[in-house]
Image (spheres, helix red, strand yellow):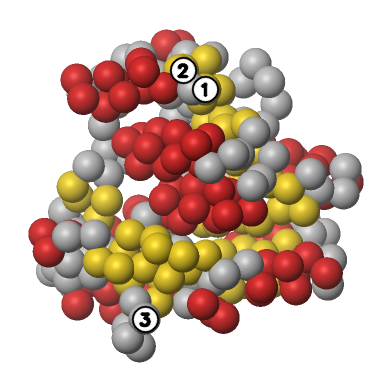
Amino acid sequence: MRGVFKIGGSVVNKTPMPIWVDELKARILAHDQIVVVHGGGSLISRELEARGEPVQFVQGQRVTSDRALTVVLSVLKGQVNGELVAYLAHQGISTVGISGIDLDLLQALPVSAPLGRVGKIQAVDLRLIEALWQAAAVPVVAPLAGDGRGGILNVNGDVAAGALAGALRADYLIYYTDSGGVRAVASDPTSIRLVLHQEEAERWIEDGTVSAGMIPKLRSGLFALDQGVSRVAIGAYRSGAGTELRR
């Protein structure tokens, strides 16, 4: 099978062994072809704050000025991607760190003027993914995209994962997050919904039941389902843990 794992910055390098590493190992043993997409939002925010730059979000997507993009590049492609590749190598998993700007993997246009240097993906070129799979390696993707004019755009990691899963017609797309799934009450970890259908997910976005980073997860997950991805889950691969997103 083909699958995409989206690893939020909040669950990278956690101890004890995070659930996503165990599940990644299990899927590799089952001979699945997997792409890992990572975030790094908390690290980016800390670095921006240290430089005195504003930290702003619109519906879960980071407002990215030219100065902020410099930080995004440094953290995502330089720090998080390298650390994650090294971490997975230590776990016995063969990986190669790449970004969406490599071999035109992700091509995008700016989403809107208020978001600045943030991209909406227009095309996905799978040549690099296929080549790494042929080399028995797991691609670890930093969510950046080329703008077709020699520039770089920041892409929300959830959006990038949904686009890749859709282009691959993946069998599954799993979002790992420290919330453990989609909660009916954001502050209550016992309120995780085991199944969330499209109509209710869209209503929860509109009425504010879900907010911040959960919004792009739901929207990109629904997009992936529309593109033919068989299964989308938030929280864990195994059934009965986290939230299954369904039409």
Residue at image location 43% in from the left, 71% down from the top? 107
Q: Measured along the vertical axis of the image, is residue 70 above or below residue 133?
A: below
Residue type beneath disc 2: Leu
Residue assigned mark 1: 246
Q: Quadrant of residue 119?
A: bottom left
Looking at the rendering, in which quadrant would you find the N terminus? top right
Horizontal side of residue 230 vs 208, given as left or right? right
Q: Nearer the viewer, residue 133 or 193?
A: 133
Q: Dot 1: few (<14), some (14–19), or many (≥20) neighbours within 10 Å? A: some
Horizontal side of residue 116 vs 212, given as left or right? left
Distance from Cα at disc 1 to Cα at disc 3: 34 Å
Residue assigned mark 2: 196
Q: Dot 2: few (<14), some (14–19), or many (≥20) neighbours within 10 Å? A: some
- Can you see residue 21? no
Residue 154, percent from left and from top? 33, 67
Distance from Cα at disc 1 to Cα at disc 2: 6 Å
